[in-house]
Image (cartoon, grey):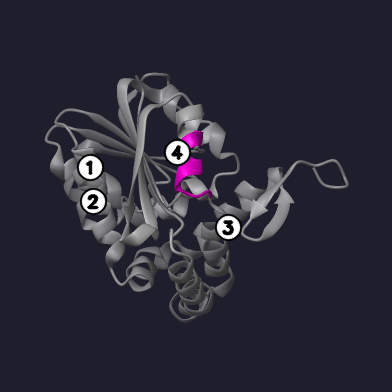
């Protein structure tokens, strides 16, 4: 708590009242929505696509299953899932309506529309009954949630017994020299790209800072176990720049 008695959390490197963070995150993604996909390609030199493909390889989507993709934005993960799983359906949930609007405009959204739904919602209070989905994914989104433990508990609640959680998120490199070099790139180049391409330096400064505030791989794996998941494991991607975490509702 701060001196006024309010519970605080972090917004990048700032400490802010918990009650304000969701609105601040919503503002970030509303501002960058129209340039979000372009910036992902530029920032990662396209590597984010390989990470999402690696996510699908490990997930191995099954035909006829039901996916909930939280913080699903413009639909990248849901599209990949549906293309690999005949007869499957997907619900893309995001806090920011403008991100979903951008997703609906994509060609894949039209082609897959019969198996795809979009909904505005909060990861900490999912608008679905318990035991509703076979798979829960969240990519580059959970670090923006105000209370990560509540989002993980909600993931557990809405998954059916035997359902699987998979999280793709930026993480920490295990080598200090590599982490130092990556930080120099992140803090000096990415906000400048945000200004040049999206005309929004501050939002990308926040995104870089939020990566450094996110727990390391082992700590996050422990949080997933504490939410009730079993068989929790993770895989580093690109030496740990990103990581995949997997867990099962047993």
Dots 1 and 2: beta carbons under 8 Å? Answer: yes
Front residue (pair 12, 68): 12
Q: Earlier in the sequence, mark 4 or mark 3?
A: 3
x 31%, y 30%: residue: 164
Q: Earlier in the sequence, mark 4 or mark 2?
A: 2
Q: Quadrant of the N terminus?
A: top right
Q: Secondary structure at mark 3?
A: helix
Report, in whole angstroms, how far the alpha carbon at label 1 lies from the one at label 2: 6 Å
Q: In the image, which residues are magenta? A: 215-223
Q: Is residue 146 above or below residue 49?
A: above
Q: Which residue is mark 3?
A: 27
Q: Secondary structure at mark 1?
A: helix
Dots 4 and 3: beta carbons under 8 Å? Answer: no
Q: Is residue 119 left or right of residue 114?
A: right
Q: Which residue is mark 1?
A: 58
Q: Earlier in the sequence, mark 3 or mark 1?
A: 3
Dots 4 and 2: beta carbons under 8 Å? Answer: no
The crowding category of the residue bearing disc 3, from other C-alpha atoms within 10 Å (few below 14, some 14 to 19, many at least 20), is few
Q: Is residue 27 left or right of residue 171?
A: right
Report, in whole angstroms, how far the alpha carbon at label 4 lies from the one at label 3: 29 Å
The label number, if any, that marks residue 54 in the structure image: 2
Q: Residue 223 location, x and y as percent? A: 51, 35
Q: Residue 119 location, x and y as percent? A: 41, 39
Q: Is residue 23 above or below residue 37?
A: above
- Which mark's residue is nearer the viewer, 1 or 4? 4
- Which mark's residue is nearer the viewer, 3 or 2? 2
Q: Residue 202 location, x and y as percent? A: 59, 70
Q: Quadrant of the C terminus?
A: top left
Q: Is residue 229 above or below residue 223?
A: above
């Amino acid at each position: 708590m701060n001196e006024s008695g309010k519970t605080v959390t972090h917004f990048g490197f700032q400490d802010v009242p918990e009650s304000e963070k969701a609105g601040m995150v919503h503002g970030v993604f509303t501002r960058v929505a129209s340039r979000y996909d372009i910036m992902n390609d530029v920032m990662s030199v396209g590597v984010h696509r390989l990470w999402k493909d690696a996510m699908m390889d490990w997930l191995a989507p099954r035909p006829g299953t039901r996916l909930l993709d939280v913080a699903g934005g413009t639909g990248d993960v849901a599209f990949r899932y549906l293309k690999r799983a005949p007869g499957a359906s997907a619900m893309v949930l995001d806090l920011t309506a403008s991100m979903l609007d951008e997703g609906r405009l994509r060609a894949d959204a039209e082609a897959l529309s019969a198996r795809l739904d979009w909904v505005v919602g909060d990861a900490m209070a999912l608008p679905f009954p318990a035991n509703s989905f076979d798979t829960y994914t969240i990519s580059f989104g959970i670090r923006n949630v105000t209370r990560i433990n509540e989002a993980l508990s909600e993931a557990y609640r809405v998954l059916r017994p035997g359902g699987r959680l998979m999280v793709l998120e930026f993480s920490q490199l295990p080598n200090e020299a590599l982490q130092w070099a990556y930080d120099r790139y992140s803090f000096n180049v990415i906000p400048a790209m945000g200004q040049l391409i999206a005309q929004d330096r501050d939002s990308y400064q926040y995104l870089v800072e939020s990566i450094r505030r996110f727990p390391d791989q082992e700590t996050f794996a422990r949080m997933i176990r504490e939410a009730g998941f079993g068989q929790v494991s993770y895989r580093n991607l690109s030496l740990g720049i990103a990581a995949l975490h997997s867990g099962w509702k047993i």
